[in-house]
Image: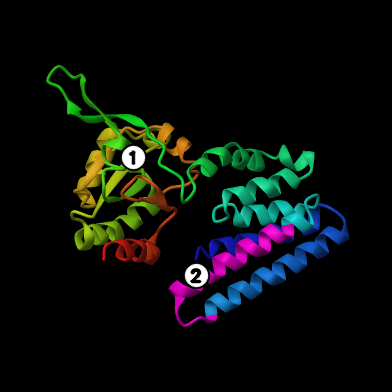
Amino acid sequence: MKRILFIAVAVMIAAVACNNGPKTNAEKMEVYEAEMQKIMDEYEAAEDPDAAEEVAIKKLVDLSLATIRKYPHDTVALVALQQCYYYADPDDLKDVIGRLSDEFKEDPFVKQIADGLDAKIMTKEGQPFVDFIVDHVLGENPDGTLNIEQRKLSDYVGKGKYILVDFWSPWCPPCKAELPNIVNVYNKYHGDNFDILSVAVWEESRGMNWKNTIDTAVVYGITWNQMNNGHQEPAALYGIDGIPHVILFGPDGTIVKRELRGKALENAVAAIAK
């Protein structure tokens, strides 16, 4: 569980309650904060953190969506949206955003979420994969030009085996923190039924490029199939607004699971690798 979410909400609530809206809105904030704290307390007290995380996330999403639906014109709705948007079903997000006031719909954060919702809905679990092409860089030619090979997602996905696709970037600390877990899963399960593909996106957004991706992949032990130099399109097509973002595709290309990390990632692969 990303505990920063709960810490952030307390700070945000204090600021909003003091500076924005009437007392009635502040009271709604207090109720929401109290319910969030209950979820946090239950999570902290649980003996099995992995199981408790899944339960806590569901409760977080249910609470936040219910709060938005009940108070769509109050500032608490924006706070609740910030807490649940990463985990909530995109259809639910589209529903609650549609209920917000016209003023709230113009909020930059709300607009950013809304802009990616159609892509998320098209690529939610149970939907077929959406193909894309990248100019994967193999290296530099003797004359200094780039040796480019066009690679498509469909070169790997939908070919009769489960494929775990890791959308990442060489500048991303959480991406690199997840890589040892992905290496472990690859070493344990790859074979005729399962494989992994890494897709580097947004490299240029932190002043990096394909060279950084290749070098980082070597350092972190990425020996499976890769696509570098992805830029914006792969993430945009899948409505990805944060990385790492790991998706499990079925043998026919159907999206099985999204947003896998840590123990949940290994559990998902172990379930299909039997």
47 or 99: nearer the eye? 99
Whether residue 48 is visible = yes
Q: Is residue 66 magenta?
A: yes
Whether residue 76 is visible = no
Q: Residues within 10 Å of mark 1 (few under 14, many from 20)?
A: many
266 or 30: nearer the eye? 266
Q: Position of residue 5 (x, y in %)?
A: 57, 61
State the SS at label 2: helix
Q: Main secondary structure of the magenta part?
A: helix
Q: Which residue shows up at 28% across the image and 33% down it? A: 210
Task: Name the side, left or right, on which 107 lies relative to 126.
Answer: right
Q: Amino acid at mark 2?
A: Glu
Q: Position of residue 184 (x, y in %)?
A: 24, 62
Q: Is residue 118 above or below residue 224?
A: above
Q: Is residue 52 magenta?
A: yes
Q: Residues within 10 Å of mark 2 (few under 14, many from 20)?
A: some
Highlighted range, magenta: 45-67
Task: Name the side, left or right, on which 274 lies relative to 255.
Answer: left
Q: Earlier in the sequence, mark 1 or mark 2?
A: 2
Q: Which residue shows up at 26% across the image and 61% down it? A: 185
Q: Which residue shows up at 77% across the image and 52% down it? A: 75
Quarter of image, res 186: bottom left
State the SS at label 1: strand
Query: Which residue, given by chain and number where applicable, does mark 2 sit on?
Result: 53
Query: Looking at the rendered structure, which numbered label has been put on residue 42?
Result: none
Query: Which residue, given by chain and number where applicable, does mark 1 sit on?
Result: 200
